[in-house]
Amino acid sequence: MRRIVVLGAGESGAGAAVLAKVKGFDVFVSDSSAIKPEYRELLDKYEIPWEEKQHTLPLILNADEIVKSPGIPEKAPVIQAILEKKIPMISEIELAGRYTRAKMICITGSNGKTTTTMLTWHILQRGGLDVGLAGNVGQSLALQVAEGDHDYYVVELSSFQLDYMFDFRADVAVLLNITPDHLDRYHYNMQEYVDAKFRIIQNQRPEDAFVYWNDDPIIRRELGKRVITARQFPFSLTRKEGIRAFIENHVLVIDTPEQCFEMEQEALALQGTHNLYNMMASALSANLAHVKKDSIRQALSDFTGVEHRLEKVATVGGVQYINDSKATNVNSCWYALESMTTPVVLILGGTDKGNDYTEIEALVKEKVHSLVFLGVDNDKLHKFFDGKVPEIRDARSMREAVDLCSQMAREGDTVLLSPCCASFDLFKSYEDRGRQFKDCVRNL
């Protein structure tokens, strides 16, 4: 019996273990941290042996194949030991793809992935399709394949997941944008990160579709270097030859061989330039899945957005508070600031991933009158921003940060949590950071 070892027992790891067990493999799960109770219960239900708070190498290095959770970096000692023994490593998505014939709509990009994924899934549901939500959002793809497969999946894919996908094929591959992110995981080499993102189109066939933002300079550069096998469906804010989705006279136009339709921009549920791109990508993907025009229109008009992404929390004392905790890189913060129409008190900080803050410098000078740095080490932020805005303060907790913001904000201002950084210095996750922000705001 072939042996599969799963490293990491979170959503993806536990799901991969269940699928491997259902398919008849000898399975073992190892996690260097404590395993959450719900995942322990799932593993026990399927009688899968596991360990937590350690990696026992003899039980790992006898595997025929390793399923690696995306959060484990290559520099981790256990990964180095596996590489030395040349044991094949794959992602949960790669494993799941072996056991389903479902159509895969796969979405990646530095920013906008979650909104686009959730919106695409929402549209397909509206259209009456049997569709699952997987990847970085929703339930593990492997677990869904194991316990009750769907006809379609909408899958959000990070560069870490793409790194360990080899034979998996996306029927529709969506590439939203590429900006510097996670460079600490890619030897601070931007091309390595770009190459990881472009793995989403590997294995595509001529009948498949590649949806991408036509005006992204890195994507445009890379298209000239690569052979694209799939049909191409670029989108842009302006109409050009070959563009399949664009804005014309304040109307969203989708133009594909499958069907064409138009929708007034003011009827769209999400506002802001970045959300126009997300909606174009989603509408194109739904079009390619043959969802009817009326269903697409309805879904684009009633989608409620994603938690922690430009989420309006409350207005207190005439000041609006917005939770954009999911903005874990500089470009994502740029989009948030670009959408602001009032003076801003901005909360930045966390675990820096090799950030270059030059991208947001002009917008900060134009729109931000006060900064709060929320992190264990704010030296890099001070070196860049000191002297560029009237007031800068430091905080070591969310309660302190929100209190400082409430003191500095004036009626008509916006307090924006859009940190540019990962959350792991003071918080469990960006979700934990966003929820603490919301709790503190509601307690003002």
Image (cartoon, helix red, strand yellow):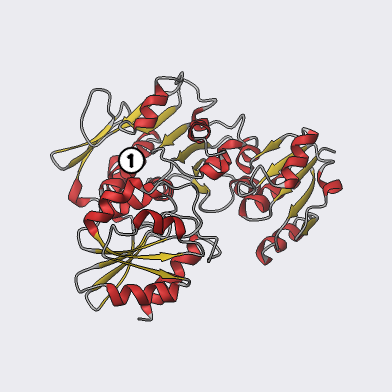
- Residue 329 versus residue 362: which sits nearer the camera? 362
- Locate residue 388, reporting x and y percent: 28, 57
The residue wearing badge 1 is: 283
- Locate residue 396, reporting x and y percent: 48, 71
Name the residue at 50% across, 66% down: 432
**Is residue 24 in view from this perspective?**
no
- Residue 437 versus residue 403: which sits nearer the camera? 403
Residue 441, image quadrant:
bottom left
Name the residue at 34% across, 46% down: 358
> What amino acid is labelled 1 in the image?
Ala
- Locate residue 128, reporting x and y percent: 41, 46
- Residue 140 versus residue 421: which sits nearer the camera? 421
- Label 1 neighbour load within 10 Å: few <14, some 14-19, many 20+: many
- Residue 107 versus residue 85: which sits nearer the camera? 85
**Is residue 351 in view from this perspective?**
yes
Query: Compared with residue 229, is residue 197 higher up or lower down, i.e. above or below?
Result: below
